[in-house]
């Protein structure tokens, strides 16, 4: 296993793994490559808080959008062979966001979304409990400007509509409509809702 921790340049290692960024990764960040032809691309120059990424196979990709000054994003990602994790611009987290993507899984977090404390994403349906439609049985899609409050586990098959707010939702593994306040187990839309970044400060 090759461990790459020097991000002062944009290195291709001898197995075709690429890390590309403009100073957004701290020198203490850790990216482990166990395979070939994996790509990590970080947009923007605003430094991420903490990054640990493990590529477990070949041909996987992680793309992280740019942050604005004062934004915070901390990540712990495990990426299977052929998996893709896309994190949009302006996505922020309270603490470390943990994402596990099974081989071939596609995880998308839309721009401007916010993930609370102890939120995790598990894009892995190895137990066979995901959607019947095999095309996305491992996938997780979170729309733009979604606010997921503390303690939620977003599982394979979840599709969360843009602008939604998830409160007291321990598990999400199904489709949720856009622009709704969602609560409970099972996750249930309660009413229409809007929110902005001022709402985050008020909730702390």
Image (tube, rainbow, N blue to C red):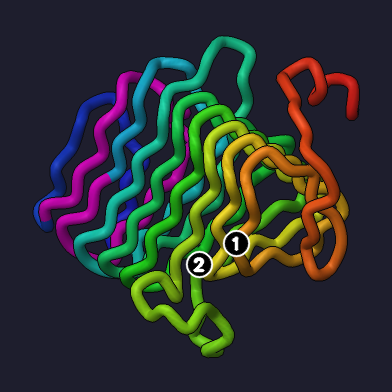
Residue 4: % across, % down:
31, 46
> Looking at the image, which residue is at 31% across and 31% down?
7
Which secondary structure lies at badge 1? Answer: strand
Left or right of 172: which side holds 80? left
Q: Nearer the viewer, residue 85 or 148?
A: 148
Which secondary structure lies at badge 2? Answer: strand
> Looking at the image, which residue is at 53% across and 35% down?
144
Residue 197: % across, % down:
72, 19
31 in the magenta segment:
yes
> Looking at the image, which residue is at 53% across and 69% down?
157
Residue behind mark 2? 123
Residue 49 seen in this snapshot? no
Residue behind mark 1? 175
Residue interval drawn in magenta: 16-39
Q: Main secondary structure of the magenta part?
A: loop
Q: Residue furthest top?
A: 69
């Amino acid at each position: 296993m090759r461990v790459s921790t020097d991000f002062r340049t944009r290195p291709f290692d001898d197995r075709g793994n690429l890390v590309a960024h403009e100073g957004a990764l701290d020198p203490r960040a850790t990216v482990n490559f166990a395979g070939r032809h994996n790509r990590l691309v970080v947009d923007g120059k605003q430094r991420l808080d903490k990054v640990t990424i493990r590529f477990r196979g070949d041909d996987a990709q992680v793309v992280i959008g740019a942050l604005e000054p004062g934004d915070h994003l901390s990540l712990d990602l495990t990426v299977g062979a052929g998996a893709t994790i896309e994190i949009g611009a302006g996505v922020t987290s309270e603490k470390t966001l943990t994402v596990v993507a099974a081989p071939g899984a596609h995880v998308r977090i839309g721009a401007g979304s916010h993930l609370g404390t102890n939120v995790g994403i598990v894009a892995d349906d190895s137990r066979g409990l995901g959607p019947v439609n095999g095309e996305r049985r491992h996938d997780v899609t979170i729309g733009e400007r979604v606010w997921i409050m503390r303690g939620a586990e977003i599982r394979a098959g979840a599709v969360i509509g843009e602008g939604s707010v998830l409160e007291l939702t321990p598990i999400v593994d199904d489709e949720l409509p856009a622009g709704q306040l969602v609560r409970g187990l099972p996750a249930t839309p309660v009413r229409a809702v809007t929110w902005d970044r001022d709402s985050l400060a008020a909730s702390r």
